Image (cartoon, helix red, strand yellow):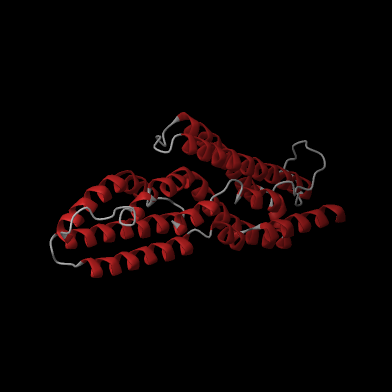
Amino acid sequence: MRAMRHGCRRAGAVVLAGILAGALAGCGAGGDSSTGDSTSSAKPDYRAASQAITKLSDAYGQVAQADVAAQQAAVTFLRAHPDGSLDDDAITSSQDQLTKAFAKRDEQRDALADLSALEDPEVKKAYDAFIAQAVEQDTFNDGYYTAFPAYRASLERCLDVFQVVSDSPPTTSSATAYAKQLMRRHDAAAKDCVEVLTELSGSKNTMMAAYAKGSLTAVEQRRSVLAAMAAGDLGVGAATDRFVATTKAFNTNLDRNTQFTEELNRLSAREEFAALQKVVASKQQAG
């Protein structure tokens, strides 16, 4: 089915983490790695700020690596076990590492707030701009990777739901009897699909949640068409038209809510991070 496979291509490994790695990781100012006291100096400690920025840059790099590892683990496991549990150690262990990387990044990001360099208006302005954007970026990124195993599973498990009619030539001349046959097939195919979409609908990533909710609606609408047909309230021709409409709505929802790379690019804090790094470096050089 076009839409499902199209969405699956978008979910390939390193789709988002590569952006993070290139945007923020490895952008630190470098220099002495010894710990500076950011609060004891009577004037802003730009050296401590530079060190903190380097640590944060490194933390973003670790997040990017954990992102890739978690995504690859999910893809590998689900290819080998299409119906496997999302609670399998192959997935949960990499998710645990991911959560730890998120926490370390947040710790380093939050540490910037305590720097005496923020007493400098220029540094504070750059810091405020970075933090505002970074929080949006990180929230989207974290929600995407946390939900990725369920998203990937949905691409595998929901495909059959949208092929029930096309793969089921009628074995009876009765439209109602045919619809009842299709309903049995639909319900069997939809069971695992609905389960994973329901889990995904609670994602903290707004696009993931919207994709799941829209997909659930499409699955429910297809079953309602079959129910109406089985009850004799809908003819084969009208039912076919509705199937086409629900599939089109599904595809539209999928296309709109799986533009993950584009959204992260829009939310990226790379420019704000570079600006903060630059102003701190210039202040440090000025002495």
Quarter where residue 246 is shown = bottom left
> Outermost residue, right direction?
286
Kindly tell me whether residue 152 is visible in this rendering. Answer: yes
**Closer to us: 71 or 65:** 71
**Closer to us: 64 or 74:** 74
Quadrant position of the N terminus in the picture: bottom left
Quarter where residue 129 is shown = bottom right
Q: Is residue 117 toward the left or the right of residue 14 in the image?
A: right
Q: Residue at x 56, y 61 (%)?
A: 263
Q: Position of residue 106 (x, y in %)?
A: 58, 45
> Outermost residue, top direction?
89
Q: Residue at x 24, y 70 (%)?
A: 238
Q: Position of residue 112 (x, y in %)?
A: 65, 49
Quarter where residue 249 is shown = bottom left
Q: Is residue 222 toward the left or the right of residue 87 in the image?
A: left
**Closer to us: 60 or 49:** 60
Q: Position of residue 177 (x, y in %)?
A: 15, 55
